[in-house]
Amino acid sequence: MRLPDVKAMTGDSRSQIYARMNSKYPAYDPSFPSPFYVGASPRWWEHQIAEWLEHQASLSKKTH
């Protein structure tokens, strides 16, 4: 998946997605899937993003 697809699937902005991947940011989430690169372009596996979203949903259910 390309970044616009990840943005659409997660509802996050570009900045939020990159913050989730950067340990220097408060929004860092080590469970967020790392991209692989095609040339200089980041790509994500759709199933990994879907699994991450399912995990986030399960965490949300536990706190409510």
Image (cartoon, rainbow, N blue to C red):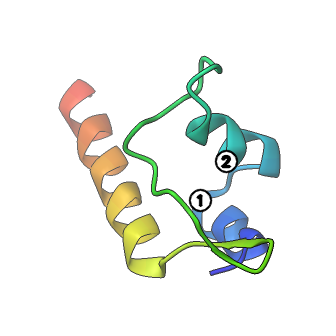
Name the residue nearer the viewer: 35 or 1: 35
Give the x, y percent position of residue 32.
45, 48
Left or right of 47 on screen, residue 3: right
Name the quarter where the N terminus is drawn.
bottom right
Describe the element under mark 2 as helix, strand or loop: helix
In this picture, is 6 found above or below 14? below
Kindly indicate whether the residue at mark 1 contacts the one at mark 2 (C-beta within 8 angstroms): yes
Name the residue nearer the viewer: 43 or 63: 43
Describe the element under mark 1 as helix, strand or loop: helix
Name the quarter where the C terminus is drawn.
top left
In this picture, is 56 found above or below 50? above
Instruction: Indicate the amino acid at tag 1.
Output: Thr
Q: Which residue is mark 2?
A: 17
Q: Residue at x 48, y 78 (%)?
A: 45
Which of disc 1 and disc 2 is earlier in sequence? 1
Give the x, y percent position of residue 30.
41, 37
Name the residue nearer the viewer: 27 or 37: 37
Instruction: Indicate the amino acid at tag 2.
Output: Ile
Left or right of 47 on screen, residue 13: right
In the rendered image, the residue lying farthest to the left is 62
Q: Quadrant of residue 9?
A: bottom right
Left or right of 61 on screen, residue 43: right
Q: Residue at x 78, y 49 (%)?
A: 13
Nearer the observer, disc 2 or disc 1? 2
Q: Quadrant of residue 10?
A: bottom right
Q: Which mark is residue 10?
A: 1
The number of numbered discs placed on residues in the rendered structure image is: 2
